[in-house]
Image (cartoon, grey):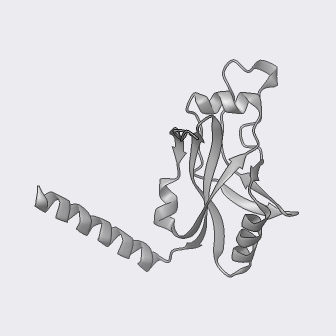
Amino acid sequence: MAQEKIHKKTIARNRRARFDYEILERFEAGIVLTGTEIKSLRAGKASIADAYAKIANGEIFITGMDIPPYREGNRFNHPPLRERKLLLHKREIRRLSVGLEQEGLTIVPLELYFKNQYAKLEIALARGKKLYDKRQSERERSEQKAMREWQK
């Protein structure tokens, strides 16, 4: 059987998530989208900076993900900030819900991308960092940058 080549095209990244949260576990989820939303994503327009996920009735939804209306979509366009359903296995949803029951954990989106022709969202079970954790991360990042500069 021939090995298929996987093409991955990133649409949006949540760069702030790695700074504000300690990433504990990652999941790849499919997204239920309409036709104009897919066309808008293919044009490279989306923002997941203010998005978060929640679990309701054994299903998981992403809220606050901004996919602007498709320019040629006329009356069939979608609302930009609507709640969208994520597609995960039951055992993954159970693992996420157990994590949410623990104190201080949340589900944050990390990256929105196309994997072959399908839109995927990488989400993570994360714990919010305290201010001193953020300072430590900043210090480590600046030290690594100084080491790279020194090696040049």
Q: Is residue 103 left or right of residue 82?
A: left
Q: Is residue 104 above or below residue 48?
A: below
Residue 78 horizontal/vertical position (percent): 77, 32
Q: Is residue 134 above or below residue 87?
A: below
Of residues 73 and 30, which is closer to you in this image?
30
Q: Residue furthest front?
A: 1
Residue 20 horizontal/vertical position (percent): 50, 66
Instruction: Name the image quarter holding the N terminus.
Output: top right
Residue 48 horizontal/vertical position (percent): 60, 48
Q: Is residue 26 above or below residue 40?
A: below
Measuring 72% from the left and 45% from the top, which residue is drawn there?
Answer: 31
Measuring 67% from the left and 81% from the top, which residue is drawn there?
Answer: 103
Q: Residue furthest right?
A: 57
Measuring 71% from the left and 74% from the top, which residue is drawn there?
Answer: 100
Image quadrant in which you'd find residue 147: bottom left
Residue 95 horizontal/vertical position (percent): 72, 72
Image quadrant in which you'd find residue 102: bottom right
Image quadrant in which you'd find residue 136: bottom left
Measuring 51% from the left and 74% from the top, which residue is drawn there?
Answer: 129
Q: Is residue 36 left or right of residue 12?
A: right
Instruction: Name the image quarter holding the C terminus.
Output: bottom left
